[in-house]
Structure formats: C-alpha cells, structure tokens
Amino acid sequence: MNNREIERKFTVEGLTYEDALETLKRGFPCTVDATSYDLYWKAPNVDFVRLRENSRELTVKVTDKGTVVDRIEENVKLERGAMKDCKRAMTLLYGKPLKLVKEFAVFEEATVICLYKVEGDPKNRVFLEVEADDLYEVDREVSYLINRLRFALTPVPYSLYQLFSEGL
C-alpha cells in the first residue's frame, strides 16, 4: 500500500479552464468531468484533514519532507451515507471547515492529471496537477504537457488548502 502522494501542482497560464480542458481531452482519456466540494480542517500534527464529496474520502496529509511534492497521504473511503456523520464529527473536533467547490476533470493513463478551477477564486486560476507513483513519471508527463501541448505552467509550491486558507 502506497501512502505517499507524489505530484506537482501548477497554474495554467493564458488558457481558460474550458480551453485547457478541450486541449487535454484531445490528448488523454477523460475519466471524470464534474463539480464537487472538499471540506478542509486544520488539525494538530498534520497539514490538514479533507473530506471529499465526489469520492467519499476522508484524507489526512502530512508534509514530512519539507515539500508538498512528496508527502504522506492517508485516505479512508466512507460508506454511502456516512458523509454527514463524518462532517459532524470533524467539525466538533476541529471547528468550521473551509469549503472549496471545484469544477474538475481527471485524465488517467500512466499518470493522473487533474485540471480544476475553484469557485469564487478571486484570482480566477486554472490549476493542473500531475500525480504518479514516482517523480520521474510526474516530470515526464509535465514535460509532455509543456513541449507537446504547449501548456504554459507556473509551479505552485503550496497545497490547495494553503492557497485558500492563507489567501495565497
């Protein structure tokens, strides 16, 4: 069982979400195209705890190597109907969550590419993440996106939680 998340996060420059989505759909099979919310809590000893609506997962992330590129990620899949109870318990423990609503698309082959935008983002950013089992595969895919699809990507060294909870 791999409890590490290995990914790079970027903003896509010069393209709308819709344009970036159409470009990716021409090069990769799209496995998810949806809108969903994530709830985030700050908790002791971890970066954050996240409850994800669309996949019904409770996730804990910990930056143990000084960067969000390679960090601990523990996921617990929730049974249908357990979201409400989980949200209540987490809110009792850690207070009101930060809620982010995302329009997103997922493309899966050897890597996982996720394109998304966050509702109400004052900067109107388009985000792209590339995730794989090792950094070599992530970087190979990023190179393809830049060189073949001509994506202008700006690295983002923060988690989505950090960006929106700290106003970055």
Image (tube, rainbow, N blue to C red):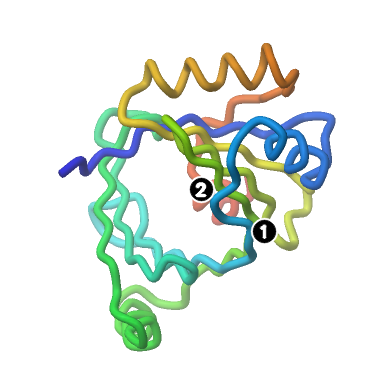
Does residue 58 sit above or below 133 in this rendering? below
Label 1 or label 2, whichever lies nearer to me, is 1
Circles 1, 2 touching at the beta carbon (< 8 Å)? no
Q: Quadrant of the C terminus?
A: top right
CA gap, disc 1 and disc 2: 19 Å
N-term-proximal mark, 1 vs 2: 1
Q: Is residue 103 left or right of residue 3?
A: right
Question: How many neighbours does mark 2 have within 10 angstroms: few (below 14), some (14-19), or many (20 or more)?
Answer: few
Of 87 and 168, the residue lying toward us: 87
Of 9 and 56, the residue lying toward us: 56
Q: Name the mark on residue 103.
A: 1
Residue placed at 29% from the left, 74% from the top?
A: 78
Residue placed at 68% from the left, 35% from the top?
A: 24
Q: Quadrant of residue 65?
A: top left
Does residue 78 sit above or below 34 in this rendering? below
Q: Quadrant of the N terminus?
A: top left
Q: Is residue 57 left or right of residue 26?
A: left
Local secondary structure at mark 2:
helix
Tell me the amino acid under the disc marked 1: Glu
Residue under label 2? 162
Tell me the amino acid under the disc marked 2: Gln
Of 99 and 141, the residue lying toward us: 141
Residue placed at 63% from the left, 54% from the top?
A: 104
Of 80 and 75, the residue lying toward us: 80
